[in-house]
Image (cartoon, rainbow, N blue to C red):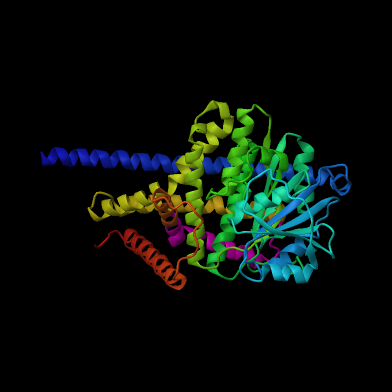
Amino acid sequence: MFEISSSIAWDLFQIINLVILLYFFAINLSYFILVVVSFIHIRRQYNTLNVHDFSGVFSSNLFKSYSIIVPVYNEEDDIEEAVHSMLQQQYGEYEVIIVNDGSTDKTLTYLKEKFDLYSSKRHISSDINHEPIRDVYASSSYANLFVVDKENGQKADAINAGINASRKDLFCAVDGDSILERDVLLKMLSSFARDKETIAVGGIIRVTNGCTFERGELNKISTPSGFIELIQVVEYIRSFIFGRTGWEFFNGLILISGAFGVFDREAVIKVGGYDADAIGEDFELTVKLHKYHKDHQIPHRITFQPEPVCWTKVPDNWATLSSQRNRWQRGLMQTLWRHRRMMFNPRYGFVGLVSMPFYFFFELLGPVIELFGYILISYLLLTGNLSVETSLLFFIIALLFGWMLTVTSLLCDELTYGKYPDATDLLKLGIVSIFESFGYRQLHAWWRVKGMVTYLQGKMKWSMVGKKPDLINFTHWIWFILINAIIIYLFYYGLSGGLPL
């Protein structure tokens, strides 16, 4: 009886190992396809922008006008720089609407002082619901600057208020600590000029940590000095350049980052605006736009432009970063569950048949399967049912494949756009990309699994940093070092022919 049970258990382990192996190849093959498609598509877009000069069209009043909507909450340190960058856009007709979402610091006071604000009678429509508005201000110094002061309702609610205050055809939603390059919207809006079915365009976000700015203009581009920020620079380049560009090629893009995106105002109003109760309001809105247009059989396109740059700050400590990734995973889970009927449904085309299943199997379940794989391999090693050499071979292949995708992203980004002129910056990013799989990848998977558990526990709101961020940071550093020590231990004894346990 025991022998039969052992045999069944061994067969089960073999099946699980095969499933994990197939899953590993499937996810990496998908990423490889996205990299190839993205590179070809990026080069095509880059050549198109160089051949066609849209500046004459956009600087006139013949094309669509737009509003830049900036929701802010306690942004007194960065608000002046951000507003100056918004006011320096190379475009004919646009307005900047700052939505103060019930800040408790001096954000509103600084806005009043720096931009000569006065109370305005500007009409606010009621197209979308949001928290009550206290007052609306205009600027004596800038005719196209307006500030909406409202009760706190969090980011999605604040953008909805900005949409109601808007008078333009399109709106660009950006974060309060973001810096826009001056030609961003010239390039972003080329998508609307090329294709009249375009209803939304996402742009690339790059990391400001390490860069210097003056009155909203970029003075010097440089990589940050901290390890945590450097890791995120690598992540952002890989995610935006060779993730969303690939999905855009297939018209299957289902995420436009809330930190930077341009939308057709009427299209967003038709779907009810942003969901104030959504954890990932940006992901939710993009999926809603696809669903609405497919349900009503309205041709549409949601695109991504890899060159226009929005610069933003990223977390510089483990506590804030883990909280952010926890929220991202909860937002992913919430939106996929809300729109589960779209998945594998041919009615929704590529989005329903490919994009949403990909996000479900690889982005949502990926960290669960990854952590389970670590636990299973550790158990098999400890019980002697798996050789160290086999484990190391699999780990090295996974590491090299992931590193190749990352380095390819970095090289293609630099060869195409050359944002980091200093060779030492590229060297730093290349070195950090190696260590991404040692410690950070495992922590990141753990944060995402925790996010899923938190969601299942019913915690649906934005989460803030814990009460003891210093303790959280210290704990994460300990885990990061411990994971690296275990990996080095396995490498050393595996390569030397044995594993003394």
Image spot of residue 66 (x, y percent): 78, 48
Is residue 177 at all visible to an observer of this figure? yes
Residue lying at 44% horizontally and 50% vertically, measured from the top left: 398
327 shown above or below 27:
below
Image spot of residue 20 (x, y percent): 37, 43
Q: Which residue ends up furthest to the left in the rendered image?
A: 1
345 shown above or below 326:
above
Residue lying at 53% horizontally and 63% vertically, measured from the top left: 432
Is 384 displayed left or right of 341 in the figure? left
Decide which of 123, 450 is in the foreground and name it.
123
Quadrant into which the N terminus falls? top left
Is 142 displayed left or right of 350 in the figure? right
Is residue 221 at all visible to an observer of this figure? no
Residue 361 lies in the magenta stretch: no
Quadrant into which the C terminus falls? bottom left
Q: Quadrant of residue 118?
A: bottom right
Residue lying at 86% horizontally and 51% vertically, measured from the top left: 92
The number of callouts visible is: 0
Decide which of 443, 122 is in the foreground and name it.
122
Helix, strand or loop for the magenta stretch, by majority: helix
Residue 441 lies in the magenta stretch: yes
Image spot of residue 42 (x, y percent): 69, 45
Specify start and end residues of the magenta stretch as a single range. 418-445
Residue lying at 76% horizontally and 71% vertically, measured from the top left: 113
Q: Quadrant of residue 115?
A: bottom right
Image spot of residue 146 (x, y percent): 77, 58
